[in-house]
Amino acid sequence: LAKTTQPISMDSYEGQEVNITCSHNNIATNDYITWYQQFPSQGPRFIIQGYKTKVTNEVASLFIPADRKSSTLSLPRVSLSDTAVYYCLVDDSNYQLIWGAGTKLIIKP
Amino acid sequence: NAGVTQTPKFRILKIGQSMTLQCAQDMNHNYMYWYRQDPGMGLKLIYYSVGAGITDKGEVPNGYNVSRSTTEDFPLRLELAAPSQTSVYFCASSYNTPQGYNEQFFGPGTRLTVL
């Protein structure tokens, strides 16, 4: 079974770039790596998804090395409203969804 | 579009009682999911469905049952509630292709307490 590992928590300051890395072994060869954001008392919300190399959208970038054993979510110029829990999601070679335990990101003024 | 809706928002059950958590989506998604999230923890997949009439177990299915008679609805049934089922339950849906799992849309959650 695949397993994911994320830092439990991180903190940073407004205006900084934040990088959160998720390690994942034994993931399905051809499937996506996805990141979600969750605020208290809400369901997770999709941030970004990628298969390999680099993907960028209006809120984040996702870096995936060639071996796909990790991925890094990059949040540029964070603000207080980016304080949340961030999850990586992969599916393993048996097509089972595997969620990371989440990284609690705290942004300070 | 309402997206994914869940009812009720809150519920308190006594040990041994049963209940059904309702979930509906209006996005014509083929996949639907039920998760539980214990305080301070990540999400655990309970059951999922790839289409009407097809369901499969996730990581933590014991104590739960599901059905999917229509594309829109995916109720979760708790039989003989136990304190260990105290959690927040999220329903989600997505439109997946053979290439993989796409973005999941989540409902607002149901907070369940079993006393």
Image (spheres, rainbow, N blue to C red):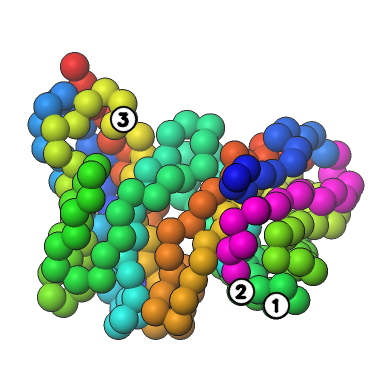
Q: Amino acid at mark 2?
A: Val
Secondary structure at badge 2 equals strand
Instruction: Classify 10 Å Cα crowding around label 3: few (below 14), some (14-19), many (20 and above).
Output: many
Residue B54 got which mark? 1
Range drawn in magenta? B14-30
Return the residue nearer the eye: B57 or B103: B103
C-alpha span from label 1 to label 2: 6 Å
Which residue position holds label 2?
A: B50
Q: Chain of mark 1?
A: B
C-alpha span from label 1 to label 3: 38 Å
- How far across and down, in percent of the image, does residue B23 sit? 71, 51
Q: Using the image, determine if residue A31 lies above or below residue A99.
A: below
Q: Using the image, determine if residue A6 lies above or below residue A16.
A: below
- Image marks 1 and 2: residues in contact by CB distance under 8 Å: yes
Q: Give left or right: position of B71 versus B17.
A: left
Q: Are marks 2 and 3 on the same chain?
A: no
Report the mark closest to the observer, 2 or 3.
2
Instruction: Classify 10 Å Cα crowding around label 1: few (below 14), some (14-19), many (20 and above).
Output: few
Return the residue nearer the eye: B45 or B91: B91
In the picture, residue A32 is in which quadrant? bottom left
- How far across and down, in percent of the image, does residue B11 sit? 77, 35
Residue located at (37% from left, 43% from top): A37
Residue A83 got which mark? 3
